[in-house]
Amino acid sequence: MLEVRGLSKSFGGFLAVNKANLDVSKGEIVAVIGPNGAGKTTLFNLVTGILKPDEGQVIFKGEEITGLPAHKTCKKGITRSFQVVNIFSRLTIFENVRISVLSQQGKTYHWFRPSREFANEETGQILESVGLIKKKDNVCGALSHGDQKVLEIAIALAGKPELLILDEPTAGMSPEETARCIDLIKRLSQSLGLTILFCEHDMELVFAIAQKIMVMVRGSTIVQGSPGEVRCNQQVQDAYLGGGDVCSV
Amino acid sequence: MGGKKSIIILLLLAAILALLPFGLPRFYTYLTALIVTMGLLATSLNFALGYGGIYQLHHGVFYGTGAYATAVMITKLGYSPWLAYIVGPLVSAALSLVMGIICIRLSKLYFGMLQISLGSLVWAIVYRWYGFTGGDDGIHGIPAPSMIGSSKGAYYFTIIVAAVAMFFMYRILRSPFGSTLQGIRDNVVRSQAIGVNVRRHQLTALVMAGFFAGVAGVLFVVVDNSVFPDMLFWTLSLEVTIMALLGGWFTFLGPMLGAAIIVLLRTFVSTVTEYWTLAMGIVLMLVILFLPEGVLGKVFEIWKSRASAEDRS
């Protein structure tokens, strides 16, 4: 579904992403892992069009989308959540998700009828499915960090994606919140058949839900494969898992 | 704020405005019409600034352009005033579109700086082109249709047109377009990521704000029967920005209140001392220190905390 070929991006001489490769097939849950500063977030920004790559290709459903601006990649079917909470802080939870639904439906230029007459059902369903419906009228600047991260996912879901990209979905969450978030991601994959690409530092979470893992170090793809293959890969162990022999344990 | 409460307040306000010319001398109807005109202008600025998050630093240009277009059409080209009243705001909207296309690629303050430069260019043209615009004298004695020629007629025309314009802005800000615009204000990157073409929405908002500024310009022509180059000088834009901030730029009616405060201050303090800007400076500093969300923002905050206190008891 998504193919990334030799993608590179540098910031003033620093190679943040260096010829990265990635394959995501339909219906898969794929994790990107790597140490801090490996270029995971930059990779996601390149795929979703927030940044323009210097070279390489991004192909989505057989169509080249390299360098397409963010609002267009969204319309192609890729939506995302952000690592640092990125929401509309002066609006309520409900309004946050409604804007995304309105955008998905192409109704953002309706200028006379009030917003509250639009997209109520769809917005309600999404909030129901992520478990935020009870807090729908809260202004989201005042929400807990965990709820804000879930709202991130809800906003991304409202775009009706085929590929959902989650940038460290559980960063900063408490253990209970993390457990709920894992449930949510699994449910989205199973019930909606969503293809999910995410990056994460929590290895437990990665090995619990990912069907495929891509390891990035210093901007490059070291290896891509099933969790078992990745766990046993010598390069990965040297670069990332601390060099110990994990496989024989 | 409860819906019923606000409707009662609005009806009361409408009644006061409707009866005002019967109880007060002519000067006060002129002053009220001027406040409403400036209030409409400040609200149209806030449309772009407070709701759109666009650094509209030279909003006065669209106000002055609307007023000049109307004045020139009536006095130099001999068109009917009614037609000129409609074309004026459209000229403002067109200028807003052109300047917007040039400026919108820049972000935040850079947008504002470029807008000030381009706006100053428009001001220079108006200031220099004696034959057409009257240069630094401006144009005086612009005739109005007899129906609104009297001071009462001009007053009612101003109130009604401003009310209609305010109603439209209110509806737009509460529509999906308005929600999207506020989303862009809160978070540009997020808006892009949910598929919103940020620049195109901002440009649309700029054209709308320019149009309503042009409406305010027309109202000034009706109220004052004159135009002068100061209307599109950058200091006026600054004054309008202060009105919006002072009244409360996250509230819809805040800029109108801010306009009332500034116009009244200027009118009455300047009769006591020529240093009226000193009074304004002090008021402004107090607002920045104690009411960062503006006067009306503070009022709503107090109402809200009272309402939640009642809920708890």
Image (cartoon, coloured by chain):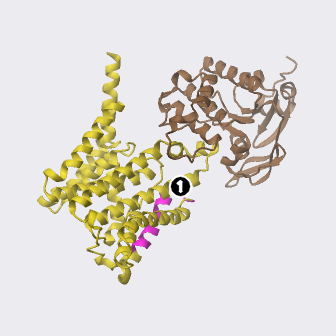
**Magenta residues (range):** B105-123
Horizontally, residue A235 falls left or right of residue A82, namely right
Query: Considering depth in this image, is B207 or B218 the residue closer to the camera?
Result: B218
The image shows residue A77 at horizontal and vertical percentages of 73, 40
Relative height, residue B53 to residue A85 (above, below): below
Which residue carries the number 1 mark? B204
Q: Is residue B239 left or right of residue A235?
A: left
| Chain of the residue under label 1 | B
Q: Which element carries disc 1, helix, strand or loop?
A: helix
Main secondary structure type of the part rendered in magenta: helix
**Residue farthest toward the bottom in the current orientation of the protein:** B131
Q: Is residue B1 visible?
A: no
B28 lies left or right of B284: left
Q: Which residue is situated farthest in the front direction here? A: B147
In the rendered structure, the colour chosen for chain A is brown
In-front residue for pair A200/A184? A184
Q: Label the yellow chain with its letter.
A: B
Q: Is residue B127 magenta?
A: no
> Can residue B255 be seen here?
yes
Percent position of residue A137, x then y: 48, 27
Q: Position of residue B262 (x, y in %)?
A: 25, 54
Above or below, B203 against B254 in this view is below
